[in-house]
Amino acid sequence: MATPMGNLMDPAAVPPADLGGKIRSWRDFPYWLLGIAAILGWIAYLVTTEERYENAWDRIIPGLRITIETTIYAFGIALVIGLIAGLGRISRNVVVKNLATFYIEVIRGVPILVLIITVAFVVVPYAAENFGFENNSVDPKWRAIIALALIYGAYLAEVFRAGIQSIPKGQTEAGRALGMTPGQTMRRIVLPQAVRNMTPAIGNDAIAMVKDTSLLSVLAVNEITQNSRKYVATSFDSRGTYPILFAVYLTLTVTLSLLLSWYRRRFGLDDNG
Amino acid sequence: MAKAQPALPAPGPQMVIIENLHKRFDAVTAVDGVSLTVETGQVVVIVGPSGSGKSTVLRCINLLETPSAGNVWVDGMHVNANKTDLNAVRAEVGMVFQGFNLFPHLTALENVMLAQRLVRGRDKTEAKEIAFAQLMRVGIPEKADVYPRHLSGGQQQRVAIARSLAMNPRVMLFDEPTSALDPEVINEVLDVMLKLASEGMTMVVVTHEMGFARRAGNQLVMMDGGRIVEQGVPDEIFANPREERTRAFFAKILSH
C-alpha cells in the first residue's frame, strides 16, 4: 500500500541520494561524500591558517543565524499554506479549487527572484498600507520570509496534493463507510499516510529553500550571501571570500540531506509503525 | 456448519428496502431498476457476472454511490433523502471491502478502535475493550498489536470485519469479501461470516462463493445487466434455475 514515492511530482522531488544505506560491497561506499568532506576540510584548514580567509569568514558567519532563521520561519509558514492550497486544489468546490490553482500557477509561472522583489517591494507595502501601517514598517527580514513562504507554499501545495492523491481511494471509502466525516477521514486516515510518503519531497523543498535564501541578498537582508558581497565590495577579495560562502551552503545542505536520510531510515518507509 | 437460518423466515421488520434503484455513470447504466427487500436477520446473497451492477447496488445502500433514481431505506431511515445525516446512517451499516482497506498506519487493534472513538464517541478504555472482544470474535486476538502489512489476506479481512462489527451495525454489507484472497484462506473468512449469519446478523453479500450462498443464504439474487434476473431460495435456484441467464452463469462458475 505505501509505495516508495520517487515520482511524487517533478524531477526536483526525486528523493535525496541514499546516504549511508547498507554497505554490502566496495561499490556501495559513498565516495562522493568523501570528496565533499575533503573540500570542506580543505576550506576549514584555509580559514584557520590564512588571515585572508579568516577575515572573510568573520564577516560572513554573523549572517548564518538570519539564513537559518529565515528558512525555518518561511518553511513553517509554507507548510501551512501548502497544506491549505493543496487541499484546495483537490476540493470539489469550484471556487476553492480555482483559487488554489490560480495561486499555484501564478507562483510557478514567475522566477523566484522576480517573485521575491515583487512581494517585498509591491505586495507587502500595498498590504501594509491597506492594514493601516506605514509603508516601511515591515522590516526586510519579514518581507523576505513572507516572499519565500508564498513561493514555497505553492510548491508544497503540489507536494501535498500528490501525496494525498497517492493514497488509495479505498482508504477514504473505508473511513466514510464507518461513519467518519470527510475531515476526520482526511486528518486521521489520509494525511498520516500521505505525509509519510511525502517526506522526501518535503525534505527536498527544505534544502532548496536554504539555497534560495541566497536570493534574499537583493532585499539587503544580512544573510550570508549578502554579507559576502558586502565584504567583497570593500575588500575586493572575491577569491578569498566566495569559496567560504560556497562551503557554508554545502555544509548546510549536505547536513540536512544526511539528517533526512537518517530520519527516513528511522521513521520512514522501513517502519510503518 | 448447519444451515444458519430457516430457509424463509416469517416476514419481519424490514431492514433494507431498495425501491426501483437506478445508477448511471456518465453514459453507462450500472443499475437499471432494482427493487429488493432484506428482512431483519436475513442473509441475502447477490451473484452475477462482473459488470452486472451487484457491487453498485451494495454501495448505494450506504451511499458510497448516490442513486440516480429510486429510494433506499435502512431500518426506517430514508438513506438518499437530502436531509438524512449520511454519517449517522453509515455508522449503522457495516461494510467489508474486497481489498480489505485496513488503515496501514494503525495496528489491528487501533484499526478497530478508531471509528468507535470518533463516531461512537466511546472513551479509550471502552473502545479498546470492544475492539479486543471483536478481534476475539473473528478469531485473531493475538494479532491485536500487529500492523496490517504483517497479516495475511485472510487475517486482514477478519480485522476489517471486526472493525465494522465494533460499530454495532444493524446490517453488514460484504462486497466480494473473498475475491482477493488466496484459496487456502478463503474459508477462515467464510467461517466468520457463517458465524455472524447464525448469530442473526442481517447481511447483504456480493460473492461468487456458492457454498456460502447455499449454507447461509435466505435469499439468492441473480443480477445481469443492472437488473435482477431471478431471485428466491438458494437451494431451489441452484437445483432448478428458471432463467436461461442464470443457468448459463451457474454452468460457467460451477463447471470447474
Image: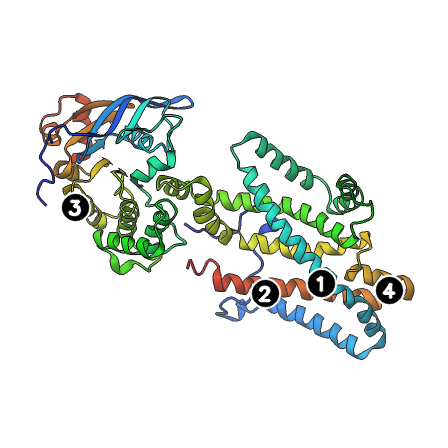
Residue at 80%, 64% in the rendered image:
A242
Q: Residue A263: x, y in percent?
A: 53, 63
- In three-dimensional space, the C-alpha distance between marks 3 and 2, rounded to whole angstroms, equals 53 Å
Disc on res. A231: 4
Residue B208 appears in the figure: no
How far is disc 1 from disc 4 in space, using C-alphas? 17 Å
CA gap, disc 3 and disc 1: 65 Å
Say which residue label 3 marks.
Answer: B195
Q: Is residue B71 above or below residue B183?
A: above
Mark 4 → mark 2, Cα distance in angstroms: 31 Å
Chain label for disc 3:
B
Quadrant of the rendered image containing residue B9: top left
Lateral position of residue B239 relative to residue A165, left or right:
left
Identify the amino acid type marked 1.
Tyr
Q: In the shown orientation, is residue A232 left or right of residue A160?
A: right
Check if mark 3 and mark 1 are on a common chain. Answer: no
**Residue under numbered circle 1:** A249
Indicate the secondary structure of the residue bearing disc 3: helix
Secondary structure beneath dot 1 equals helix
Q: Select label 3 or label 4 by which is in front.
A: 3
Marked residue chain, label 1: A
- Asked which colour scheme the image uses, the reply is rainbow
